[in-house]
Image (cartoon, rainbow, N blue to C red):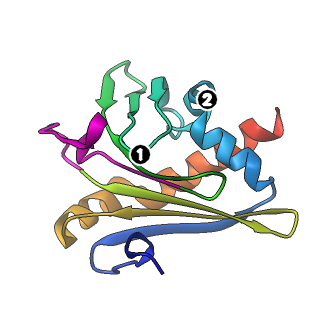
Amino acid sequence: MTAYSTVNPETDLVLERTVDVAPELVWKAWTTPELIVRWFAPKPWSTASCEIDLQPGGKFNTVMRSPEGEDYPSTGCILVVEEGRRLVFTSGLGPGFRPQASGDDLPFTAVISIEPAGDGTRYTATALHADASVKKSHEEMGFAEGWSAALDQLVEVVKAL
């Protein structure tokens, strides 16, 4: 087991579900900017833009838009790419592994794990936080509901491909 796959219940949040789409479609949805803008933000929010450089040190940048039209940019760095299986990125670093003072109130590292499960995919999204207070803030912000709604939207988008 690798260090980033170990969940600390004090600081980490986990969404784990089995969805009825193939793993390669889930991977495609997570790694294709044109698809991410269609599902990444839970409605009524939207994703205004996405830029990905799919390699360790590459960028994972999104702009989420509120229902009122306010934009919330997020600049991140891809840490791990295991083709078709695992994507790890963080808001704590910028592209090129550069430390950044992003002003992000909720810095975290996301570990997206994709595994075949029958005709579908076992999907696990883990949000790693620096401490329990940041985890609590993310939880209270609606992690479970928001990330679950986004996953439902991902499934809807890839089924239409």
Mark 1 vs mark 2: give the one in front: 1
In this figure, which residue is indicated by the disc labeled 1? 56
Q: How many marks?
A: 2
Q: Is residue 99 above or below residue 2?
A: above
Residue that badge 2 annotates:
38
- Cβ–Cβ under 8 Å for marks 1 and 2: no
Question: Residue at left 47%, top 41%?
Answer: 55
Query: Of residues 141 and 104, which is closer to you in this image?
Result: 104
Per the image, label 1 sits on a secondary structure element best described as loop
- Quarter of the image containing the C terminus? top right
Q: What type is the residue that disc 2 sits on?
A: Arg
Query: Which residue shows up at 32% across the image and 39% down it?
Result: 76
On residue 82, the disc is none
In the rendered image, the residue lying farthest to the right is: 119
x 21%, y 72%: residue: 132
Q: Answer with the quarter of the image where residue 29 lies.
A: top right
Question: 98 and 39: which one is in front?
Answer: 98
Q: Is residue 67 left or right of residue 94?
A: right
* Residue 89 covered by magenta stretch: yes
The magenta-colored residue range is: 87-106
Q: Amino acid at mark 1?
A: Pro
Coordinates of residue 131 in the picture (x, y in percent): 18, 69
25 sits to left or right of 137: right
Q: Residues within 10 Å of mark 1 (few under 14, many from 20)?
A: some
Q: 91 left or right of 51?
A: left
Residue 134 percent across, percent down from the top left? 21, 62
Q: Is 79 a magenta residue? A: no
Label 2 packing within 10 angstroms: few (<14), some (14-19), many (20+): some
Is tag 1's residue or tag 2's residue first in the polypeptide sequence? 2
Task: Work out how far the residue at label 1 is from the one at label 2, CA to CA, in angstroms.
Answer: 24 Å
Q: Quadrant of residue 51?
A: top left
Q: Secondary structure at mark 2?
A: helix
